[in-house]
Image (spheres, coloured by chain):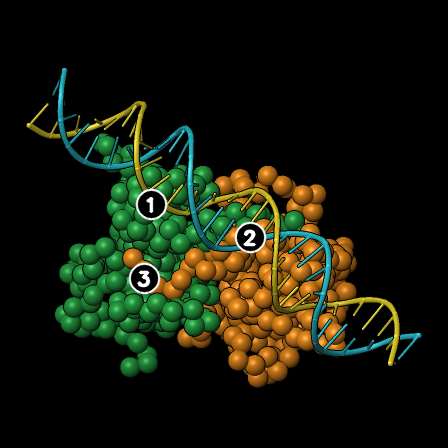
Chain colours: A orange, B green, C cyan, D yellow
Amino acid sequence: MKDGPDIARIGALIGDPARANILSALMSGKALTATELAAEAGITGQTASSHLKKLQEGGLLVQAKQGRHRYFTLSGPDVGTTLEALMGLAARKGHLRTRTGPRDPAMRTSRVCYDHLAGDMAVRIFDSLQSRDFLKITQDKGGLGLTASGEDFVTGFGVDLAGLRLSRRPICRACLDWSERRNHLAGALGAALLVRFQEEGWLRREKDSRVVHISSHGHENLNRLFPSSLD
Amino acid sequence: MKDGPDIARIGALIGDPARANILSALMSGKALTATELAAEAGITGQTASSHLKKLQEGGLLVQAKQGRHRYFTLSGPDVGTTLEALMGLAARKGHLRTRTGPRDPAMRTSRVCYDHLAGDMAVRIFDSLQSRDFLKITQDKGGLGLTASGEDFVTGFGVDLAGLRLSRRPICRACLDWSERRNHLAGALGAALLVRFQEEGWLRREKDSRVVHISSHGHENLNRLFPSSLD
DNA sequence: AGAATGCTTCGATGGGGATCGAACCATGAA
DNA sequence: TTCATGGTTCGATCCCCATCGAAGCATTCT
């Protein structure tokens, strides 16, 4: 019965409301200090410190000390992906509606998933990429890769593909969207695209939240760049 | 800060060792009775009953009463997939080695992931399918689909594809393998293939465990049916 | 009918852990 | 140096919840 990795350990880590709030806040992808996270979770500094220590020991968080601040981040994209999957389970059984905040609809249309885009628009982008044969299943880890025409496309949009290959991180990853229940693009490319969108000024991130607002100007350009066969 | 679904609720559900053991046991895909699960988790029937109730209310389990028995199952394939992802996180930081049982290597080579195959061989099968262009990214939910040649292939192997389409379940799904850290095939087709392999007598499931033993005869046939470019 | 098995509910117990106040280190500013 | 700010460690408190015994339903067998 004791087969496989100890799932209860991380379950317990995520299971505490304060820690869950911390993790949710870090799903924004931003590095936050201990006091910021304490405020986010609604607890004092002391307890936050204890939680952060446990999350680190559990391998979910990493710490970067900078001056007298300590910045915390999710330890990797796979943590973000798994948390998103858990949100999928939580959203299933109506456990969402217990506290469906005013920002909830905004979250569904567009949000940040650790370091890439998620929500309605992100799913449409993913669909568009694969319907034009820019994305294909490959031998790569993660099973997803760019085709030759796809490489041309993203480089044409200003993504430094060669630079991305330098890191050990897979270029393309599928991430299951909890609101849409379909895949969107993660991985190094997903992260790079989000950066490019911001550089173009197509989207604006809401302060201290995962919510992303797409300008009307941005909508036009995204729809043009990633046409959907559903329209 | 309270954005998104309540991740802590399910985290707490998975976080208790007894419940985690119950969930792990159900990852075998078999429907188990309350007393079987109690034994599996090392607790009495009363406490098991309380845990099972909570897991049901949390939407992770479903119950089917049959006579004076109550059979429990994971409420869906997505639960299995998410648990597998959590195992991925747990396995990362060496938290496995705390109790790396004797069956652990066997688990890594081949095991059942709720209703389909996982482990080394399952990953090789996935690779083989896509390298021969039987699997492709599609518009489908989950983003994975069979090509025309792929449909011919699996029907030729005796899979009732038309029957599978009757259910609302997606045919193809990618599931991230915790031991290999690469995708293997889930979804209705993944489940159907496991059934076919068993019908052929190529594998034997270990009693009361997720472990699957592949006979030498089975190895030959699987390697022939799913040649890998890596060999 | 009575007896046995599978499972649940109730009540009481106990322990683990989340929380905060206070004191303690580290870094940067005056 | 002295003070202020960001974080951690320590100790004490307290509450939630896992656990089990005992009693109660349901179902099936004889």
Circle 2 chain? A
For the point 53% across and 68% down, the residue is A57
Evaluate whether label 3 is on the same chain as label 2. Answer: yes
For the point 59% across and 79% down, the residue is A164
Residue A3 tag number: 3
Circle 1 chain? B
For badge 3, the amino acid type reads Asp
For badge 2, the amino acid type reads Asp
Q: Quadrant of residue D8?
A: bottom right
Callouts 3 and 2 close, C-beta under 8 Å: no
Indicate left or right for C4 with B98 as reference.
left
Q: Is residue A123 above or below residue D28?
A: below
Q: Which residue is mark 2?
A: A16
Q: Position of residue A102 (x, y in %)?
A: 70, 43
Indicate left or right for B171 with A57 as reference.
left
For the point 59% across and 61% down, the residue is A51
Q: Which residue is mark 1?
A: B73
Q: Who is closer to the viewer here, B18 or A135?
A: B18
Q: Earlier in the sequence, mark 3 or mark 2?
A: 3
User: How far is disc 3 from disc 2 in space, using C-alphas?
Assistant: 25 Å
Q: Is residue B129 visible?
A: no
Q: Is residue B48 above or below residue A16?
A: above
